[in-house]
Amino acid sequence: MSERSTIESRGGAGGEQPDPARWRILSVLLVAIFMSLISVSIVNVALPSIQNGLDASQSDIQWVLSGYALTFGIVLVAAGRAGDLMGRGGIFILGVAVFTLSSIAAGLAPNAEWLNIARFVQGVGSGLLNPQGVGMIQHYFRGAERGKAFGYFGSTVGVSVAIGPVLGGLIINLGGADLGWRLTFLVNVPVGVVAIILALMWFPRPLISRGARQPVDGPAPARRSRSMDLVGALLLGFAVLSLLFPFVETEVSPFIWLLLPVGLLLIAAWVAWERRYARLGNSPMVDLKIFATRSFANGTVIVTLYFLGMTSVWVLVALYMQRGLGHSAFEAGLVGIPSAILSAFSAHWAGSRVMLYGRKMVISGLLIALFGLASTIAVVLLTQEGVVSEWWLLLSLAFIGIAQGVVISPNQTLTLADVPLNYAGSSGAIMQTGQRIGTSVGIAVVTAAVFASLSFTEWPGAMAIGFTLIGLVVIVSLVFALADQRYRRRTA
C-alpha cells in the first residue's frame, strides 16, 4: 500500500460524517493559538522597555521569557490528557480565560515580580489551550481535510513567530516607551474575549463531560478506568521542569546542571509508572505503545530537532540587526515579514498536498532550510565586506520561512496519522513538549556559542558560527526524515 493510500485509509474512522461546524471550530482554535504563540516572540522586542519601565534586573527580564516557557512546557501533556478525558472544548475555553486574565495582570503590572507571576500563569493558560487545538483537529477532520487543517495550523505557527517582533516594535513605537510594552500584553485581551464568545457559541455541548464523548479508534480497551493518572502527570511535569530549568536559568550555580540527570531519572520513573498503570487495567496519561509506531516516534524526533535548531534563527537575527548593525527593534523585525508571508502560504500549500507527497515534503523542506541558512551566512559575510546590503536578508530568510511551512504542517499530519483519537490531545502535547524542550535548549546553546565567539570575532563571524550549529542540527533531523522515508518504502 502506498504512503498516500495508507494515510487516507486512516482518515475516515467509522465512516462518520464530518461535523458541519468543523471549520468554524478551527477558526476559533487558530485565533487563540495565534494569540498564545505570538506572546512568545512579541515580548522579545519589548524587553528593554520593560526593564526601564519597571527598573527590573537582568534576572527579572530573563524570567519574563523563561517563566512562560517553563509553565507552558510543564502542563502541556497533562492538559492534553485532561482534554481527552473531560472534553477538549471546555479545557480550551478555560485555557483562553486563564491566558486572557493573566495578560491583563501582566499589562497592569506595577513591578517586575508581579509581571513574572503573571507570565507564569500566562504559560499555564497557553499550555491548557494549545494541546486541545491539536486534539480537536484530529477529532473533527479526516483524510485530506485533516492535512489542510494542519496546513492552516502551520501557517498560524509560522506567522506568529515571524510577525511577533514586527507587531511588538510597531506597538511600542505607537504607545511610547512606558505604555507600549504594556500594550504588547493588553492586545491579547480583546482577542481572548472574542475567542471565548465564539467558542461558547460554536463548540458542541457538553463542554465538560468526563470521559463521555471522545471517540476511540485505537487498541485501548473500553473497559479501562479512564482516570487522569495524577502520579504520571506529576512525574512527567517534574521531569520536564528538571530538563528545562538549567537552560532557562543559565547564570546561577553550575550545580543546577545536576537537574539534567535528575530529569532523565524522572523520565525513566514515568515510563515505569505508565507501564505498571496500564498493566493494572487503567488508562495511562500517555499510551506508550504509540512510541512503537514509527510514524509518531520519527515525526516527534524530527520536529524536536527542527525546533532545537531553527527557533534560534530569529533570536540571532534580532541580535545581529540591533547589536551588530545598530538598527531599531522595529527595523530588526521588518526582515522577517517576507518569511512570515511565505511561511503562511507554504504551510497551507503543503498541508493540502501532504497526502500526495508524504514524508518527501518534509525532506524537501529541510533541504530548503539548509539553503536558507547557507545563504544567510553568505549575506552576513558579504555585508561585512561591503559587497551587499544587510537588507538582502529579506531574501535569504524568506527561504527559511518557506521551509518552516513545508516542514511543520506536513510533519504534524504524518506524525499523528496513526495515533488513536482518544489519545489525540496527549500525543499532540508530547510533540509540543518536544518542541518546547528543543526551543529552550537550542536557544540557550546557540546563543551561548555566539556570545562566546564574540570574544575572538565580530558579529558576522559569530553569526556564521551560530547558523552553522543550527545547520548541523537540521542535518541530523534530515537523517531521521530520510530513514523514515526508507522505512515507509520497505513497508509499503
Image (cartoon, rainbow, N blue to C red):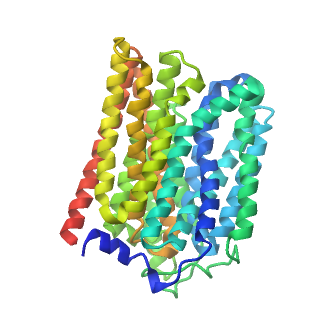
x, y (%) of residue 427? 47, 65
- Taking the view exactly as shown, the residue that stands out farthest to the top is 386
Above or below, comparing residue 25 to residue 257 in the picture: below
* Residue at point 73%, 45% (across, down): 103
Give residue 271's quadrant in the image: bottom left
* Residue at point 28%, 54% (across, down): 481
Q: Is residue 446 left or right of residue 158?
A: left
Q: Quadrant of the N terminus?
A: bottom left
x, y (%) of residue 151? 47, 57
Q: Is residue 54 left or right of residue 323?
A: right
Q: Visible in this render: residue 125?
A: yes
Above or below, comparing residue 371 to residue 347 in the picture: above
Give residue 309's quadrant in the image: top left
* Front-most of residues 68 and 28: 28
* Front-most of residues 440 and 200: 200
Above or below, comparing residue 433 to residue 335 in the picture: below
Total tally of numbered discs in the picture: 0
* Front-most of residues 173 and 213: 173
Q: Is residue 365 left or right of residue 141?
A: left
- Taking the view exactly as shown, the residue that stands out farthest to the left is 490
Above or below, comparing residue 90 to residue 347 in the picture: below
